[in-house]
Image: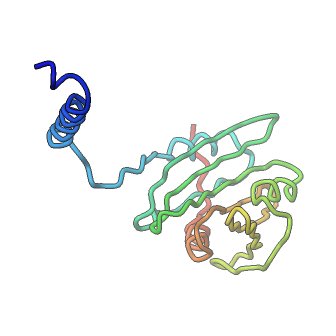
Amino acid sequence: MQRFTQGFYGYVVAVAVCFGLVGIFLLIAPQSREEHIPRVDYSMDIANLGRAAPYTVWAPSAPTANWVPTSSRMTTEKGTHTWRLGFATAKRAHAMLVQSDEKPADKFASRLANSEAVVGKRDIAGATWEERFRKDKDQRSLVRFLPDATLIVTGTADWDELSTLAASLKQQPKPTT
C-alpha cells in the first residue's frame, strides 16, 4: 500500500483521482449552452424622467429585433437630469442612448462621445445628427442637439445599428401624476 502513496506512482494516482472527480462533476453539473445577457425593464425610468425632467423625453418606440436592453440609469445632479439606456445589439456590440439637459451641451456631447471632432452628418428620420468617431476606443457616436436637451447614441455598434436606434426614438408623453 505504501508504494501507491509515495513517489511517482503516488503522484500518478493522485492526478488520476483528481481528473476522475472533475470528470464526474462535469457530467452531473448542469450546463447551459445559451448566451445569457441580463435584460432590464426601463419603463419606470422613462416615467420617472418624464416627471422630473423639464425637457421632452425620447425613448425607443419599440424593441429593435434581437436587441437586449441591458442597463438603464437615471440621475439628477445639480438640477441636471440625465438618462442612460444601454443595449446589446443584434451583432452583440454595445449601443447606448444618453439624453440630458446638461449645459453647455457641446461639452456634454464631447465628453460622452469621447471626441470633439465631427466627422460627418447623417439624416435619420428627418433629423440631422452629427457623427463623431474615436478610433482608439472603436467608439461611434451620433449627436443631436435639441433646444432643451441633447441626445447621444453611442457605442461600439456600427453606424447602421446606431442609426437604427436613433430612428426608433420617439417623444414620450408627459406622465400624469
Query: x, y percentage for residue 146?
Result: 78, 62
Query: x, y percentage for residue 119?
Result: 80, 77
| Quadrant housing residue 135 | bottom right
- Residue visible at 69% across and 68% down? 140
Closer to us: 9 or 48: 9
Q: How many marks?
A: 0
- Residue visible at 41% across and 68% down? 65
Closer to us: 175 or 37: 37
Relative to 81, is 163 above or below?
A: below
- Residue visible at 23% across and 23% down? 6
Q: Quadrant of the N terminus?
A: top left
| Quadrant housing residue 45 | top right
- In the figure, is residue 89 to the left or right of 102? left
Query: x, y percentage for residue 173?
Result: 59, 54
Query: x, y percentage for residue 34?
Result: 29, 55
Q: Quadrant of the C terminus?
A: top right
- In the figure, is residue 164 to the left or right of 149? left
Closer to us: 13 or 172: 13
- Residue visible at 51% across and 46% down? 42
Which residue in the rendered view is the most extreme toward the left?
A: 1
Q: How is the image coloured?
A: rainbow
Which residue in the rendered view is the most extreme toward the top?
A: 2
